[in-house]
Amino acid sequence: MKDNIRKIYIIGPVGSGKTTLANKLSKKLNIKMYELDKVVWDDDNGNIKRDLDDINKRFKIIIDKSSWIIEDVGRKKFREGIKKADIVYYLNLNKTDIYKRCITRWIKQKIGIEKFNYNPTLKGLIQMLSWAKNDIRNKEEKIEYIKKNSKKYKILTKKEIKKI
């Protein structure tokens, strides 16, 4: 990866590996990584959703920095980050892989071998699968927005993600 890339935005469905890729790039490039779920949700106070003004303020602080790696599902409220990123990666996995990863993550969290931000209940698994289904359904619209509004982008397949 070229040295002039200091702002990286990673977008993909729930369970696509955004956090894993962001963490690896963060270590490799020595750039701080931000999970936008943590901007939206206050994990320190019972996983309560922050108000919109607080979310916007926190997000602006991040994207105004000289370098960052952001990972998110591609929520519309964070699209300014797409425009400011030096490169946007969209993680393009098939539906079966996404669902398998969601279920595997939930099982690992349930038995305590993976950390979690919220209690891994059956209701939570169903919610995660519902979010994944929505992300998959809206994939083309998100990719089209990325293509039109980013400086540079790359749609990554499962094989390409593993190479990074």
Image (tube, helix red, strand yellow):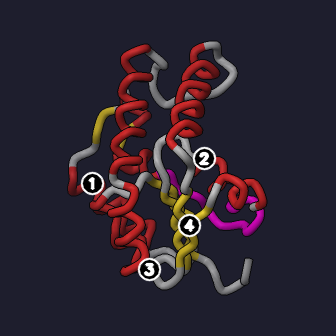
Q: Nearer the viewer, mark 2 or mark 4?
A: 4
Q: Which residues are magenta?
A: 25-35
Q: Which mark is residue 150?
A: 3
- The residue drawn where x is 52% and y is 71% is 88
Q: Earlier in the sequence, mark 2 or mark 3?
A: 2
- Where disc 2 sits, the SS reads loop
The answer for how far apart the CA atoms under marks 1 and 4 are is: 31 Å
Q: Is residue 110 magenta?
A: no
Pointers 3 and 1 in contact (C-beta within 8 Å): no
State the quadrant of the N terminus: bottom right
Q: Amino acid at mark 1?
A: Asp
Q: Which residue is mark 4?
A: 155
Q: Nearer the viewer, mark 2 or mark 1?
A: 2
Q: Amino acid at mark 4?
A: Ile
Note whether 110 is above or below 13 in the view shown: above
Q: Nearer the viewer, mark 3 or mark 1?
A: 3
Q: Which mark is residue 17?
A: 2
Q: Which residue is mark 1?
A: 54
Q: Earlier in the sequence, mark 1 or mark 4?
A: 1
Residue 57 locus on image (x, y percent): 30, 62
Q: Earlier in the sequence, mark 3 or mark 4?
A: 3
- The residue drawn where x is 50% and y is 41% is 95
Pointers 2 and 3 in contact (C-beta within 8 Å): no
The answer for how far apart the CA atoms under marks 3 and 4 are is: 12 Å
Q: Nearer the viewer, mark 3 or mark 4?
A: 4
Front position in the image: 80 or 62: 80
Q: Which mark is residue 124?
A: none
Q: Earlier in the sequence, mark 2 or mark 1?
A: 2
